Image (tube, grey):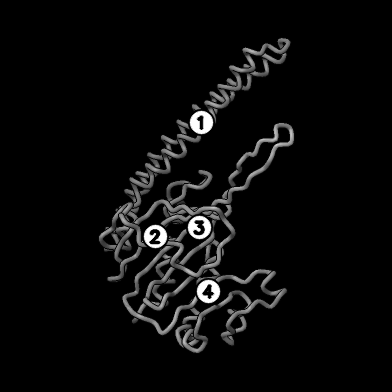
Amino acid sequence: MKNTIEQKMTMIEEQLAQELNKSKSGKLGGKMLSLLGAVIGIAGVILGGKIVLVIIGGVLIGLGQMVQGKSRGETSQQVFDTIVPDMMSMIFEDVQINPAPHLLDVKDTNIPLPNHSYCSGSGYVRGIYRGLTTELCTIELTSVSEVQREETGLWEKTEQKVYTGQWMLCELNQEFSTWLTIWPRDRMDKLFNAQTIKTNNEAFDKRFNLSSDDVQAALHILSSSRIAQILTLADSTFGRFSMNLNSDGRLYIAVHSGRGFFDLGKGRENPAQLCQRFTSELKWFTEMMDIFCCR
């Protein structure tokens, strides 16, 4: 069994290396275009403001940036299509890529989120974890604002991404006596002594808020052993995390990591490091789900 997993990881690393090499070629071509555009644009300025050269330089710079962006986007999608099924199948059964309809809906949770204009999800993957239906995805929140330009009087819309995080839903196939939501405490919570349920675990109460419509039932669900396990995982998390447990047994876990599942990041990690990060993040989520699964 161990050899099989090691062989599969080796294959995944090789596939990842191939896709990253393709991406580097695309980025190099884009950088060369941008560099050429900059040289032509500067030459136009030096030669007395040759508008045609300046325009050509600007167009080439734009094309170079577009090529780099397209290459990065295509690589991310290709990596997702190539390695995700194999990587997920090492932990989950019956893996489905982009299943429809989606089970995970942010509006079904009580997890506090930044103010935003709209929410979008991507990279949906569904599988069976220890007999439980599980779905993961990347959630992005965008804020849209309008600004009026003084010189023209026209209104312009600007968009700003205010949240990117990894979300996972697990259907626990059991009912609970109430719902509960856990989310990190921040400075404002501490300053104004925000309303929260106290668990009598000082370490937990300093780091997290807890809300529910039934205090005693929530504290019964959130036993001392579960609190201890949550704190242990909190020390190894890769972002600020929250969770919501519905009374019908749907468990939502959200990590505000600034990236999505299987995100290539800035390209500084080699294939082995990327695979290690991907697997460790999945493992963190499954270990958090294990805390609430019946044993």
Q: Amino acid at mark 3?
A: Gly
Q: Nearer the viewer, residue 115 or 234?
A: 115
Circle 4 residues within 10 Å: few <14, some 14–19, many ≥20: many
Which residue has dot 2 on it?
136
**Distance between mark 2 and mark 1 Cα atoms:** 30 Å
Which residue: 32% across, 59% down?
Answer: 126
In the structure shown, which secondary structural element does the residue marked by tag 4 occupy?
strand
| Residue indicated by mark 3 | 165
Of labels 4 and 1, earlier in sequence is 1
Q: Residue at x 47, y 38 (%)?
A: 72
Q: Disc 2 or 1, which lies upstream in sequence?
A: 1
Judged left or right of residue 185, residue 265 is left
The residue type indicated by label 1 comes to: Met
**Distance between the Cα atoms at labels 4 and 1?**
41 Å
According to the picture, the residue beneath numbered tag 1 turns out to be 66
* Mark sitting on residue 206: none
Residue at the disc numbered 4: 182
- Please say if the residues under marks 4 and 1 sit with CB atoms less than 8 Å apart: no
The earlier-in-sequence mark between 4 and 3 is 3
Disc 4 versus disc 3: distance between alpha carbons? 16 Å
Q: Around disc 1, counting alpha carbons within 10 Å, would you say few (fewer than 14), some (14 to 19), or many (20 or more)?
A: some
Callouts 1 and 3 close, C-beta under 8 Å: no
| Circle 2 residues within 10 Å: few <14, some 14–19, many ≥20 | many
Kind of residue at badge 2: Leu
Tell me which amino acid carries mark 4.
Ile
